[in-house]
Image (cartoon, rainbow, N blue to C red):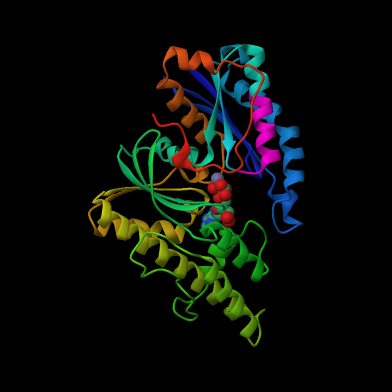
């Protein structure tokens, strides 16, 4: 079975080709970071227009790389949500148009299911069940993953996502969008403990989190600094911020391991590319004799491979009748707001 995956929920157009027998055959990505940087964040209309320019060309590119033709495709997987409505509609339009022309099925994938399954593109890959910490620009959630398509929400952020906090902190420090990698690099030059920031909800007895108070605490530190431009201050603040985020995420993950008695952990989503967070979580999980898995580094942030992988997993578990019902009909929609726990159970 040969599946084309298309991701266009935010500022990356990602396309990939995956086969049940040969695994990931090819993937291609166009990031719009340079285009949005001038505005300090993603401009939805510009994002949609750029996805239109890239999607079909990237699809042709992965087919060429893998030495396949459009006619070889058995199905298409496309991010249906959550994300920017216009951006999602571009990916969905391209997916449904190709599927309609080829008379093949098309399936809408939840973006976070993609992030989770990206960890199974690593070697070794996590077996089910596992505990998942999803940390992206829009979501911060802890879930129990029983198997493909069986997700139980255990806790989540009540306000900002961890990635959003990275991006806003970057803005306050005058670092370019997206903030994660830049804040992380600056933090490496700072001293732990020099600036202590708030760790909201770290001691709350549940698995919920909050990062907006941390953002305010960064803002207050910048406002109160005698010279906010000072290099030592900026590096110490970045360090203080990274320490606070990693402390909260580590505390909640450990609590979740205790509560669920699950020792296998998957960390996914854009922020899982963060080196400081990876190191901290690896050491905490190892201390508790658990196993921890991450997606391959380049598949942590948005990409087409994760959508192709999720699509293949769902297609493989479908009855012939269910597959038939997904054969390109030309009509489709997207779900800009969508909970992973509301996806179809498998
Ligand atoms: O998963 P993703 O690519 O897109 C969403 O689904 O949101 O995540 C993007 C987020 C951004 O907030 C970005 O700043 C953050 O992931 N990010 C990082 C790193 N790389 C990306 N945060 C911290 N450290 C990184 N190395
Ligand atoms: Zn994402």
| Residue 54 shows in the view | yes
Quarter of the view holding residue 13:
top right
At horizontal 39% and vertical 69% (from top left) the residue drawn is: 202
- Which residue is nearer to you in this view: 342 or 317? 342
Residue pushed farthest bottom? Answer: 226
| Left or right for 161, reference 252 | right
At horizontal 50% and vertical 35% (from top left) the residue drawn is: 306
Stretch in magenta:
83-95
Residue 156: % across, % down = 44, 55
Q: Is residue 35 above or below residue 195?
A: above
| Residue 124 shows in the view | no
- The tally of labels here is 0
Residue pushed farthest front? Answer: 342
Q: Does 79 appear in magenta?
A: no
| Left or right for 253, reference 63 | left
Q: Does 93 appear in magenta?
A: yes
Per the picture, the main secondary structure of the magenta-coloured stretch is: helix
- Which residue is nearer to you in this view: 218 or 272? 218
Q: Is residue 181 above or below residue 125?
A: below
At horizontal 45% and vertical 76% (from top left) the residue drawn is: 192
Quadrant of the snapshot with the C terminus: top left
Quarter of the view holding residue 59:
top right
Residue 342: % across, % down = 47, 38
Residue 79: % across, % down = 58, 34
At horizontal 62% and vertical 15% (from top left) the residue drawn is: 70
- Which residue is nearer to you in this view: 345 or 263? 345
Residue 100: % across, % down = 65, 15
Q: Quadrant of ligand 2?
A: top right
């Amino acid at each position: 079975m040969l599946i084309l995956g298309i991701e266009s929920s935010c500022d990356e157009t990602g396309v990939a080709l995956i086969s049940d027998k040969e695994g990931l055959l090819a993937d291609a990505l166009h990031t719009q970071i340079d285009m949005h940087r001038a505005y300090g964040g993603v401009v939805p209309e510009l994002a949609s227009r750029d996805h239109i320019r890239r999607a079909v060309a990237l699809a042709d590119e992965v087919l060429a790389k893998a030495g396949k033709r459009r006619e070889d495709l058995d199905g298409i997987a496309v991010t249906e949500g959550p994300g920017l409505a216009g951006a999602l509609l571009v990916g969905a339009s391209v997916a449904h148009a190709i599927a309609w022309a080829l008379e093949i099925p098309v399936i809408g994938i939840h973006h976070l299911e993609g992030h989770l399954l990206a960890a199974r593109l690593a070697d070794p890959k996590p077996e089910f069940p596992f505990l998942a910490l999803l940390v992206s620009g829009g979501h911060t959630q802890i879930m129990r993953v029983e198997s493909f398509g069986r997700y139980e929400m255990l806790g989540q952020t009540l306000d900002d996502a961890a990635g959003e906090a990275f991006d806003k902190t970057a803005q306050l420090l005058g670092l370019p969008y997206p903030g994660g990698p830049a804040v992380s690099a600056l933090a490496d030059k700072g001293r732990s403990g020099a600036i202590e920031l708030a760790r909201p909800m770290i001691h709350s007895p549940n698995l919920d989190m909050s990062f907006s108070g941390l953002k305010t605490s960064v803002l207050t530190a910048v406002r109160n600094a005698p010279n906010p431009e000072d290099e030592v201050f900026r590096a110490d603040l970045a360090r203080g911020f990274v320490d606070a985020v990693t402390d909260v995420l580590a505390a909640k993950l450990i609590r979740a391991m205790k509560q669920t008695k699950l020792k296998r952990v998957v960390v996914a989503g854009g922020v899982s590319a963060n080196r400081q967070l990876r190191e901290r979580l690896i050491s905490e999980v190892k201390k508790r004799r658990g196993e921890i898995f991450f997606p391959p580094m380049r598949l942590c942030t948005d990409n087409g491979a994760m959508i192709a992988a999720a699509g293949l997993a769902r297609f493989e578990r479908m009855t012939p009748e269910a597959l038939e019902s997904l054969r390109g009909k030309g009509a489709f929609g997207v779900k800009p707001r969508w909970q992973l726990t509301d996806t179809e159970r498998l």
